[in-house]
Image: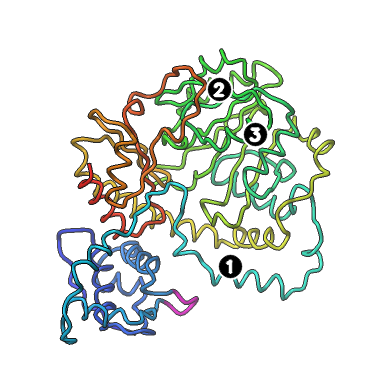
């Protein structure tokens, strides 16, 4: 096992010092491929720091591919190829070659940095665990895995999801209320078959893909205003809608967290008429960095008025395409009578993999790791954007995978995008997330200014630092 002679300084984050020391030793070729690192416990004891501090450093090295975790054996240095010699050539040391030419440096700087709010970090995905579960399912040779299965999804997975939702989100449901489908789009299409033609209401700044789907259903789409607490129930009442689409735990894209008073107003609105329902899209509730997780709206629903939709696209992987819907008991009979003819759109093999992944604790461990990684990126984004605070206001912090920047001075979102594009940075204007009905609806004051969205999930820390520096230069 390799000895690490790390000297920690009083200034700066301790985990960053540990991370930078190990990374630099690898890049210099002093730590070689296959060498074993000290365990997090032993290194923490040696440095007299908390074990969490060492775990955060190791997690960042894992996410960047410098080290790998081998089950029951520990952490090992990864193969870095010609990284060491490339470092020498760039500095002109030992090789006798000149430094990289100015055009090459310019070309390197021009690599686009994409602050997409739609992507996630897959560098720490537990491929080995996923492969092991998959192999175990196939080796067992269960013939049932190749059959069509239940329309709602396999009972075992529905029971696992029900337990998970009760513990993590406070959702009160039974396995029979859950329907599993390949993505939220499919579940919304299935819901249209259950509810029939509707008048649906959405906030003016919202998840526009859901709005497009509602329009394709032939729904009459109504737009409501919003404030810092979310959808305005007073405007919702005037629309004549009987269906409202909300994201109370972390509204996309504004980042608004709906307080309990507004939630009660919405539930009251829904309970006033028998055919009114609320669709709660709880798309990224797993990622909250300060305080306790925000309970779901469904947890406060005692009248059976909330249709809860969740997904594993953000928490596991987008390509898995597995989402779930919790139907109120009042809609179950309609589903079983008219929609049970629709086969499940998720293969039984994938359902069983996810079932074991959650049931056996792998999902919880992976989530905890990703929360630490995303929090490091989130905090770094806030730090690096500090240089812009004299001209911009930051909002949407402490949860999710993106931030919002609102310009305090005159200008337009298109101008901000153009200037960023000239520095090879891609940003996302808030206007792309508005639905328009020709009326001037109320929105929070901060969103009335030119506002852009910056996602950070799929970027490395170096890309975040470089991207924020470019934005500071551009703006």
Characterize the local packing of mark 2: few (<14), some (14-19) or many (20 or more) Cα atoms within 10 angstroms.
many
Q: CA distance from mark 1 to mark 2?
A: 40 Å
Q: Name the spot of residue 397 as percent of width and height, x first.
A: 35, 41
Which sits in the foreground, 10 or 421?
Answer: 421
Secondary structure at numbered mark 2: helix
Secondary structure at numbered mark 1: helix
Q: Is residue 80 above or below residue 424?
A: below
Q: Which residues are magenta?
A: 69-74
First-in-chain label (1 vs 3) = 1
| Residue identified by numbered label 2 | 266
Q: Residue at x 17, y 72 (%)?
A: 7
Q: Residue at x 50, y 76 (%)?
A: 71
Q: Is residue 265 above or below residue 215?
A: above
Q: CA distance from mark 1 to mark 3?
A: 30 Å
Extreme-top residue of the structure: 238
For residue 308, which numbered disc appears in the image? none
Corner quadrant of residue 69? bottom left
Q: Residue at x 34, y 56 (%)?
A: 112
Corner quadrant of residue 107? bottom left
């Amino acid at each position: 096992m390799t000895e690490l002679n790390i000297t920690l300084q009083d200034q700066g984050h301790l985990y960053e010092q540990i991370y930078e020391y190990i990374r630099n030793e690898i890049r210099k070729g002093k730590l070689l491929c296959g060498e074993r690192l000290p365990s997090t416990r032993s290194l923490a004891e040696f440095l007299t720091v908390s074990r969490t501090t060492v775990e955060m450093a190791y997690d960042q090295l894992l996410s960047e591919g410098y080290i790998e975790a081998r089950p029951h054996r520990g952490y090992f240095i990864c193969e870095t190829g010609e990284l060491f010699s490339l470092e020498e050539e760039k500095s002109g040391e030992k090789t006798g070659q000149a430094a990289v030419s100015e055009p090459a440096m310019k070309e390197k700087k021009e690599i686009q940095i994409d602050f997409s709010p739609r992507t996630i970090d897959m560098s720490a995905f537990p491929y080995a665990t996923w492969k092991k579960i998959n192999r175990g399912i196939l080796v067992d040779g269960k013939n049932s895995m190749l059959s069509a299965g239940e329309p709602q999804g396999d009972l075992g997975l529905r029971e696992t999801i029900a337990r998970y939702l009760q513990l993590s989100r406070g959702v009160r449901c039974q396995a029979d209320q859950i329907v599993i489908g390949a993505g939220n789009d499919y579940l919304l299409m299935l819901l249209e078959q259950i509810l029939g033609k509707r008048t649906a209401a959405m906030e003016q700044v919202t998840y526009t893909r859901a709005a497009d789907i509602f329009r394709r259903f032939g729904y009459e789409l109504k737009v409501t205003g919003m404030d810092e607490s979310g959808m305005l129930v007073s405007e919702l009442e005037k629309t004549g809608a009987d269906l409202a689409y909300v994201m109370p735990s972390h509204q996309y894209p504004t980042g608004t967290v709906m307080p309990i008073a507004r939630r009660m107003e919405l539930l009251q609105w829904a309970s006033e008429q028998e055919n009114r329902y609320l669709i709660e899209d709880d798309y990224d509730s797993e990622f909250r960095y300060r305080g306790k997780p925000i309970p779901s709206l469904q947890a406060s629903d005692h009248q059976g008025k909330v249709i809860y939709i969740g997904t594993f696209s953000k928490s596991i992987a987008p390509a898995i395409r597995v989402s779930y819907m919790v139907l109120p008991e009042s809609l179950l009979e309609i589903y079983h009578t008219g929609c049970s003819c629709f086969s499940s759109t998720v293969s039984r093999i994938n359902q069983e993999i996810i079932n074991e992944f959650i049931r056996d604790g792998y999902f919880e461990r992976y989530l905890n790791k990703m929360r630490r990684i995303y929090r490091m990126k989130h905090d770094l984004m806030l730090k690096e954007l500090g240089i812009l605070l004299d001209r911009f206001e930051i909002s949407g912090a402490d949860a999710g995978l993106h931030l919002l920047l609102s310009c305090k001075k005159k200008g337009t979102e298109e101008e901000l995008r153009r200037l960023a594009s000239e520095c090879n940075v891609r940003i996302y204007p808030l206007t792309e997330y508005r639905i328009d009905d020709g009326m001037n609806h109320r929105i929070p004051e901060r969103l009335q200014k030119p506002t852009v969205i910056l996602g950070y999930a799929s970027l490395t820390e170096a890309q975040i630092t470089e991207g924020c520096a470019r934005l500071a230069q551009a703006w």
